[in-house]
Amino acid sequence: MSLPLEGLSAIVTGAGRGLGRAEALELARFGAAVVVNDYGQPGRDGSGEASATPAEEVAAEIRAAGGTALAHTGDVADFSQAGALVELAVAEFGKLDILVNNAGILRDRMVFSMAEAEWDSVIRVHLKGHFNTIRFAAAHWRERSKAAAGSVYGRVVNTSSEAFLAGSAGQPNYAAAKGGIVGLTTSTALALAKYGVTANAICPRARTRMTEDVFAGLDRPDDGLDPLAPEHVAPLVGYLASPAAARINGQLLVVHGGMVAVVERPRVAAQFDSKQETFTYDELDALLTPHYAALPEGETFGAVEVLGLKRA
């Protein structure tokens, strides 16, 4: 039986544990040759000594199952190391076809007490880390497209979060980074479509070390399906990386065990026009104050209410 990703190569960042590990294993199961990237720091806040062990163990697991994989232990938030990661995939496999960005850290704090370093570090790993790898992968696809005088195969799957959709009071840095990733994804999708490359983002809900406090009250079931297992997110990543998803571009999808929700881009919910050239304070007060007063509490975040999302 043919595999949907047979003959393709992939990079998965943050793939030593949790979601990234599940995604790397899934891509390999679908036939892709995988570069498993993980900086290997033990703390979910990016603390501790970097280690090659997490990436090497996942790469070894893929090879033991009959797949093709190698480990990369660089920091994707470092521009040159991200470039070296893409170069490694191209050198080893001849080309890069799939980029899955998953690497991230948490440094939670309320906005009124967050330190500058806590803001900078999370933005650096999540948002800059996504940009760095995309930048080098995009250049690779553009060069290949020019050489071929036509489209090439390219897939980008980025990792956003419901913290961006629903808000997360104690995670202003994380929510901002994840919102930025959505903007980066849509921009990338528009820029690379003419080369045959798609870019999409997912908001995964899964039980990992990054979300251990979020799902603290939701224990794993003793028997049967654990809806928060990272393995339930991985099939969507495999699908978005496949030829079957060629028409899906610039999209945001929420996913967890047994559920995928396609999120609409923001739409205008109401429009008010001034009776003169510009609005006055009194006119705005007369129009907007009763409009919002009439909405049920929480209705401002209508998409959040429809999905029943909480902090994640």
Image (cartoon, helix red, strand yellow):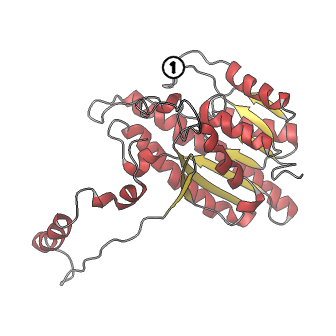
Q: Residue at x 51, y 19 (%)?
A: 47
Say which residue label 1 marks: 47
- Residue lying at the far top of the rendered structure: 49
- Residue lying at the far front of the rendered structure: 223
**Residue nearest the observer in this picture, 59 or 93:** 59
Occupied quadrant, residue 21? top right
Where residue 268 sits: x, y (%)? 37, 71
Occupied quadrant, residue 34? top right
**Residue nearest the observer in this picture, 216 or 85:** 216
* Mark 1 residue type: Ser
- Under circle 1, the secondary element is loop
User: In the rendered view, would you say 10 is above or below 195?
Assistant: above
Is residue 65 visible in this depiction of the protein? yes
**Residue nearest the observer in this picture, 241 or 137:** 241
Is residue 80 visible in this depiction of the protein? no
Q: Quadrant of the C terminus?
A: top left
Where residue 117 sits: x, y (%)? 41, 28
- Number of marks present in the image shown: 1
Horizontal side of residue 242 vs 16, given as left or right: right
- Residue lying at the far left of the rendered structure: 282
Say few, some or many: other residues with alpha carbon within 10 Å of mark 1 (under 14 / 14 to 19 / 20 or more). few
- Residue lying at the far right of the rendered structure: 1
Where residue 284 sits: x, y (%)? 16, 71
**Residue nearest the observer in this picture, 34 or 173:** 34
Where residue 203 sits: x, y (%)? 52, 48
User: In the rendered view, would you say 87 is above or below 61?
Assistant: below
Occupied quadrant, residue 26? top right
Q: Residue at x 38, y 37 (%)?
A: 171
